[in-house]
Amino acid sequence: MKRVFFIMLLAVQVVQADAQGRDVVLKQGVVSYTPSSFYISDVMDDRADKSVGVLKDGNKSEPINLHNGTAPAIKMLTNVPYRKGGQAIVLHISTLNYTLRKQGRQWTGSSKATFVFYAGGKKVIEYSSSGDVEIPKPEDYIESFLRQALEKDLKRFDAWWPEHKGAIPTNDAVKVNVEIGRTMSKPDVIVYSPQRPLQIGDFKGPADNSVIELAATFSGIGFLYSGKAEDGQVVLDVTVTPYFDISQSWFKENGKNPRVLAHEQTHFNITAIKACELVKAIKADSLTQENYAAKLKELQTQNMEASNAEQSAYDTETNHGTIEGKQHEWEQRISEEIKKAGCY
């Protein structure tokens, strides 16, 4: 079924109101232009002063008001029903102001209107119109200027929107592409790979002789993300990279043996598992334009705390690798978890 819809033109009459000013009553009429790519779902008046200007006749000056309020009046004029495939647009009134003065039998009128187009709660673009004319009747000018300004801005937006809509994030939900990093620009690091186990020569940091441990592994999870708008939606590309810091990890001379190296490798394996868990947590969460930055930080913090807790439990239960049975249990379990993680 073909849908037919209308934008309402305005015809006006000015009636004498009380001391609050003149009330301009807008009547329905058909606008000749019908937008093809959008419809007006609502109208918001952002102005502090809700009048639309002032009418000056000699020493008498009174405000001009649109009957029943400016936003409802303009919403009536732009009352385009929903169109399949069309974008819902909220029209914000930023400026609407007339100054009408009587000089003899003639009126002069100056005006300005600024309408701001919002899509998906985001400001998209604004258009302004202005005019200065001599007129026989002020009500004729109020009607004609507002009609022409609305028609012109609807046409301009209808031509602009199809070309630019893909770059405007109107969908609140955020799409996330997240992956495990395979490389890293940071110097002196080794990015985790099951095919590249640690070697004693990778531990190049100065040993800490104030502790009893024979070696120390400094590892972490790099986290980078960037965003862009695609097809009206924010798309995030997130990279989670488990890495080993060569310059801070160290071995003491009397600890340079396969047993101690295996203990340190398991520390790095735990970091790799936690990186994979972070990837899965990000994929499982529901991110929006409003919350994605805070959510990503929260997930990072939770993951870091869980990682620190497991690393500590590992050292405690194995007594830093000196309890052979416990060390073997941890190595086997963590090795199986790496295989099941699905990230490497």
Image: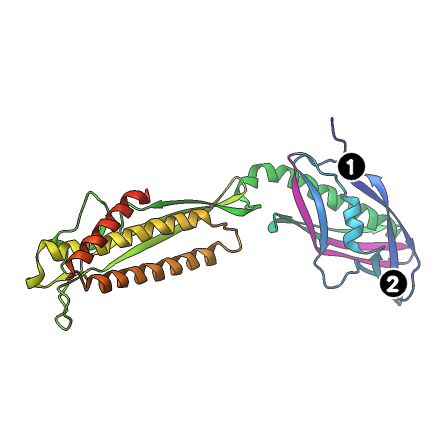
Which secondary structure, mark 1? loop
Which secondary structure, mark 2? loop
Farthest bottom residue in view: 210
Q: Nearer the viewer, residue 66 or 134?
A: 66
Characterize the local packing of mark 2: few (<14), some (14-19) or many (20 or more) Cα atoms within 10 angstroms.
some
Farthest front residue in view: 325
Does the magenta segment cover residue 87? yes
In which image quadrant can residue 210 be found?
bottom left
- Residue range of the region highlighted in magenta in the rendering: 85-112
Dominant SS in magenta: strand
Which marked residue is nearer to the observer: mark 2 or mark 1? 1
Q: Which residue is mark 2?
A: 21
Q: Which residue is mark 1?
A: 6
Q: Left or right of 220: which side holds 141?
A: right
Mark with earlier residue (2, 1): 1
- For the C terminus, give its image quadrant: top left
Q: Position of residue 148 (x, y in %)?
A: 76, 44
Which residue does the image show at 53% across and 47% down from the upper left?
A: 173
Q: Left or right of 337: which side holds 167?
A: right
Q: Amino acid at mark 2?
A: Gly
Q: Position of residue 14 (x, y in %)?
A: 90, 53
Which residue does the image show at 81% across and 54% down from the upper left?
A: 109
Q: Nearer the viewer, residue 41 or 206?
A: 206
Does the magenta segment cover residue 216? no
Q: Position of residue 96 (x, y in %)?
A: 74, 55
Which residue does the image show at 16% across and 51% down from the upper left?
A: 198
Q: Position of residue 205 (x, y in %)?
A: 15, 62
- For the N terminus, give its image quadrant: top right
Characterize the local packing of mark 1: few (<14), some (14-19) or many (20 or more) Cα atoms within 10 angstroms.
some
